Image (cartoon, rainbow, N blue to C red):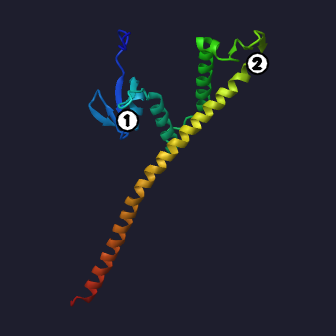
Amino acid sequence: MSNLPPLGESAPRVVKRYSNRKLYDTKDSRYVTLPQIAVMVRDGQEVQIIDNTTKEDITEVTLAQIIYEEQKENRRNVPLQTLRDLIHQRTEKVLEGLREGPIGRLIPGAAKDGKVETKDEETVAIPPKVVAPSLVDQAKGKIEDLQNTLDERVQAILLSFRPLEQLRDDVRRLHERLDALERQLADREPK
């Protein structure tokens, strides 16, 4: 089976993510940033982000990271209900796939049409919301884990800037001392 797009559709713009976290646009042969990818998506371009080492498609994670960064900067304020709806729709889609797919028959106690089959071949009716919360809770846990990972990475980046800030402070103090010494010399020079 071919990975080529159907006739009339253009291939997605492929962006490779390297181990140093740099993003390389293979179409324009240049490095790009997350905000630049956000502009591409807003312009209607189909973008696919691939991890260069593992060849794994990380488009969803990267787009979620863009949303996270924009929310953090309050540049784009996505309504909270919209974020909740996204999570809920995603969970419902996963549940539906599990219920309807062949894997659903293999999972003991998996719900089908609001019913659970037990080992004794008797069917017990359960409300659909009994199944959904566990997956919703799992999804929330995964999102919280992702959030914690992103927070840790941001903290690590910020820590790497501290020596630069300290160096900047040292340079500022040296300038101040140099200015003070120049003023003292100017005061001592004969006029």
Residue 142 rendering spot, x and y as whole percentages: 58, 34
CB atoms at circles 2 and 1 under 8 Å apart? Answer: no
Q: Nearer the viewer, residue 163 or 170?
A: 163
Q: Give the residue type that dot 1 points to.
A: Gln
Residue drawn at the location 60% of the way across and 23% of the way down: 89
Residue 132: name its quadrant: top right
Does the rendering let one see residue 101? no
Is residue 87 rendered to the left or right of residue 74? Answer: right
Q: Amino acid at mark 2?
A: Pro
Residue drawn at point x = 57 percent, y = 35 percent: 143
On residue 36, the disc is: 1
Quadrant in which the C terminus appears? bottom left
Residue 140 location in percent, x, y?
62, 33
Percent coordinates x, y for residue 177 in the rendering: 33, 76
* Residue at x 39%, y 23% (from the top left corner): 46
Residue 145 position by quadrant: top right
| Depth order, front residue of 123/83 | 123
C-alpha gap between disc 2 and disc 1: 45 Å
Location of mark 2 (residue): 127
The mark tally for this picture is: 2
